[in-house]
Amino acid sequence: MEKKLNIFNLNLKRLNLSAWLTVLSLYVLPYKVAEDGGKLFGYPFTYLQFHSWTDTKIPLMFLGVQVAIFAIDILIIYFVLTGLEKIFMKRKNAN
């Protein structure tokens, strides 16, 4: 029988954990400094940017969030966690 990919068959607990790990990585992993002096956060792709405060007159304009890149980072961590779980289950069942 052929297996079909079902995109909506995601483990919500693991997806939630992936989102939290992505957000917590902001505090653990180092940031990059952009050419304009701003700071770039996110791993593996940059999804959060702090521009220098003097460039803008409106306080919220110094923060940039790229939601699509954030979602991609969450999915990458989700698939890494899924792969690690499969590897551990194979090792556990082999013993």
Image (cartoon, helix red, strand yellow):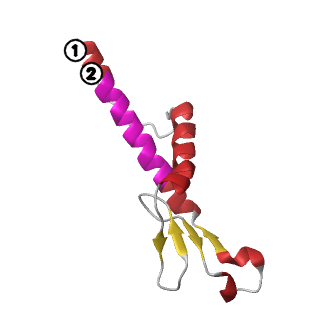
**Extreme-left residue of the structure:** 94
Q: Nearer the viewer, residue 9 or 72?
A: 72
Residue at coordinates 76% horizontally, 86% vertically from top-left?
A: 57
Q: Is residue 87 visible?
A: yes
Quadrant showing the C terminus: top left
Q: CA distance from mark 1 to mark 2?
A: 6 Å
Q: Is residue 2 visible?
A: no
Q: Secondary structure at mark 1?
A: helix
Q: Say what amino acid the circle numbered 1 marks.
A: Ala
Give the residue type at disc 2. Answer: Lys
Q: Quadrant of residue 66?
A: bottom right
Residue on which the image places disc 1: 94
On screen, residue 67 above or below 1: below
Quadrant of residue 61 in the image? bottom right
Q: Are marks 1 and 2 in contact (CB under 8 Å)?
A: yes
Q: Residue at x 52, y 86 (%)?
A: 36
Magenta residues (range): 73-88
The residue where tag 2 is placed is 90
- Dividing the image into 4 quarters, which one contains the N terminus? top left
Check residue 43 for magenta coloring: no
Question: Residue 86 — which label?
Answer: none
